[in-house]
Structure formats: structure tokens, C-alpha cells
Image (cartoon, grey):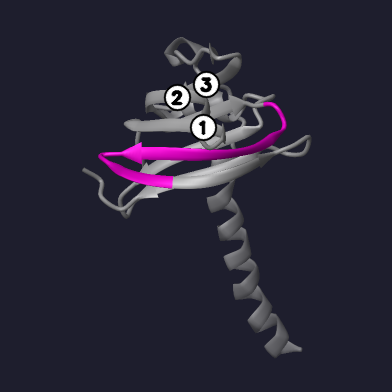
């Protein structure tokens, strides 16, 4: 029994440390609204948010509801946010529904149900993913580039 206590104590400590390290990412702390400049925009009948530079702005976007596609753009080994991404969302090949220049690091979009191809380009390097948008939870896409320059 003493051996079991000796083993469980360090495991419990690790679990507590991991939980406290993860909790700031899901923080719902109040935001300084004066520093936040995020406003919803519309293109071709599609409403979206683009921004997230600075902690208050990124929290403001992350706390927004009603957007069914969430995209995050990052670079480098430290996964730093980047806001120099060109985004194209297509309903079908050649049928573009949204085009954004210098978007990010967070982009939240309200899309009608359907299957979409998302093309994200940074410094000439393209990433693609498919988002099947339905009535369930928001679809999260993360686009990462290794080169931070």
C-alpha cells in the first residue's frame, strides 16, 4: 500500500500541473474592449471575422459564437500566430465563396451547410484542407508553416 501511495502522489502532481498549464488557453477572463478592433465583415453573403493580434483580440474572437468554421494560422517551431495569409474558400472547384488577403491569425466564418475546400497561402507556400460544415460543432482547421520568415 505504501508503494501505491508513493506512485500515485507524483502522478497526481503531474496531472494537476498539466491541467493548470492547459487552462489559460480556455480562459474566459474579461477582455479589455478598448484594445479590441475586431468587427464582423461580409463578402458574397458570407460573414467572417479576421484578426487575433494581441491577447485581448484573440480572446474576443475565440469567445465569439455562431461561426461554424474556425481557422488558425501559425509559423515556426514556436507555433507563433501569423496574419499574412491569403485564404480562398471554395464550395466546389472554381466556385469561390470567400477570398481574404492578409488574414489571420484567427479567421472565423459562418458558412451554409456543405463541403468546402480551404486554400491558405503564405509566402507562395500553399496548404489545403476540406471542411464538412453541418449543424454540429464548429469545424477547426489549423494551418502551419515551418518557415517563420
**Sequence-wise, which precedes: disc 2 or disc 1?**
1
Residue located 55% across and 21% down the image: 48
Question: Label 3 to label 1, Cα distance in Å?
Answer: 14 Å
Q: Nearer the viewer, mark 3 or mark 1?
A: 1
| Left or right of residue 114: residue 118 | left
Whether 100 is drawn above or below 124: the answer is above
Q: Quadrant of residue 68?
A: top right
Residue ID for mark 2: 99
Q: In the picture, residue 54 is in which quadrant?
A: top left
Nearer-the-camera pick, 103 or 11: 103
Q: In which quadrant is the C terminus drawn?
A: top left
29 to the left or right of 122:
right
**Residue 35, image x, y percentages:** 43, 14
The residue identified by callout 1 is 89
The residue shown at (56%, 59%) is 17
> Which tag, 2 or 3, sits closer to the chain's start?
3
The residue at 74%/37% (across/down) is 134
SS at circle 1? strand
Report the predominant secondary structure element of the magenta stretch.
strand
Could you say which disc has been placed on residue 6 in the image? Answer: none
Foreground label between 2 and 3: 2
The one nearer the camera, 4 or 87, is 87
Amino acid at each position: 500500500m505504501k508503494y501505491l501511495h508513493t506512485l500515485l502522489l507524483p502522478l497526481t502532481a503531474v496531472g494537476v500541473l498539466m491541467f493548470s498549464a492547459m487552462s489559460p488557453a480556455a480562459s474566459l477572463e474579461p477582455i479589455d474592449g478598448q484594445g479590441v478592433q475586431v468587427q464582423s465583415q461580409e463578402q458574397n453573403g458570407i460573414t467572417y471575422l479576421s484578426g487575433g493580434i494581441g491577447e485581448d483580440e484573440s480572446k474576443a474572437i475565440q469567445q465569439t459564437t455562431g461561426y461554424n468554421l474556425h481557422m488558425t494560422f501559425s509559423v515556426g517551431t514556436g507555433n507563433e500566430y501569423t496574419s499574412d495569409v491569403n485564404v480562398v474558400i471554395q464550395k466546389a472547384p472554381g466556385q469561390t465563396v470567400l477570398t481574404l488577403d492578409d488574414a489571420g491569425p484567427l479567421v472565423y466564418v459562418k458558412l451554409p451547410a456543405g463541403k468546402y475546400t480551404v486554400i491558405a497561402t503564405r509566402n507562395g507556400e500553399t496548404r489545403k484542407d476540406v471542411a464538412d460544415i453541418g449543424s454540429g460543432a464548429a469545424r477547426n482547421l489549423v494551418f502551419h508553416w515551418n518557415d517563420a520568415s
